[in-house]
Image (cartoon, rainbow, N blue to C red):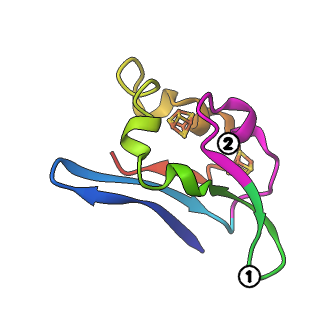
């Protein structure tokens, strides 16, 4: 399943997409993310998977801003840390 976290506003779309079929709950994204965007939850299928914590879901543009201006898409700490390639960003 692809879980979308984020929002649209007048300036664009700000989503993090987590492919829960790829996620193995290794927690590397939690370690890598300086803003504490990720957590591990138990999903509807009783599987541990990564998710975006509630408090960040409506402010991803701001939470992720320190990572984005200085690095290209593939250099984002969370994307680099995720070996199964379960994380993608929409912007
Ligand atoms: S871009 Fe940076 S702040 Fe945003 S989720 Fe990834 S590591 Fe965390
Ligand atoms: S780094 Fe990737 S595989 Fe590991 S918990 Fe995070 S999203 Fe899941």
Residue depth check, mark 2 versus mark 1: number of the one nearer the observer = 1
User: Taking 59 as reference, is 28 above or below it?
Assistant: above
| Residue 64 appears left or right of 83 | left
Identified at 64% across, 38% down, the residue is 36
Instruction: Spot the residue most to the left.
Output: 10
Q: Quadrant of residue 69?
A: top left
- Residue range corresponding to the magenta coloring: 22-39
Per the image, label 1 sits on a secondary structure element best described as loop
Q: Which residue, given by chain and number where applicable, does mark 1 sit on?
A: 44
| Residue 38 appears left or right of 42 | left
Some atom of ligand 2 lies within 8 Å of the CB belonging to the residue at label 1: no
Question: Is 33 included in the stretch rendered in magenta?
Answer: yes
Some atom of ligand 2 lies within 8 Å of the CB belonging to the residue at label 2: yes
| Residue 75 appears left or right of 40 | left
Nearer to us in this view, 4 or 85: 4
User: Taking 81 as reference, is 90 above or below it?
Assistant: below
- The crowd level at tag 1 (other Cα within 10 Å; few <14, some 14-19, many 20+) is few
* Residue 47 image point, x, y percent: 82, 72
| Residue 47 appears left or right of 16 | right
Q: Which residue, given by chain and number where applicable, does mark 2 sit on?
A: 82
Identified at 46% across, 26% down, the residue is 67
User: Taking 28 as reference, is 87 above or below it?
Assistant: below
- The crowd level at tag 2 (other Cα within 10 Å; few <14, some 14-19, many 20+) is many
Instruction: Spot the residue most to the front.
Output: 55
* Residue 32 image point, x, y percent: 68, 30
* Residue 82 image point, x, y percent: 67, 42
Identified at 17% across, 47% down, the residue is 11
Q: Distance between the residues labelled 2 and 1?
A: 22 Å
* Residue 23 image point, x, y percent: 72, 58
């Amino acid at each position: 399943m692809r879980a979308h976290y984020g929002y649209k506003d007048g300036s664009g779309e700000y989503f993090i997409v987590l492919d829960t079929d790829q996620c193995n709950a290794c927690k590397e994204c939690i370690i890598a993310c300086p803003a504490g965007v990720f957590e591990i939850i138990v999903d509807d299928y009783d599987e541990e998977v990564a998710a975006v914590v509630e408090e960040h879901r409506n402010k991803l543009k701001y939470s992720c801003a320190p990572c984005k201006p200085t690095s290209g898409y593939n250099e984002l700490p969370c994307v680099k840390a995720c070996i199964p390639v379960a994380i993608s960003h929409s912007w």
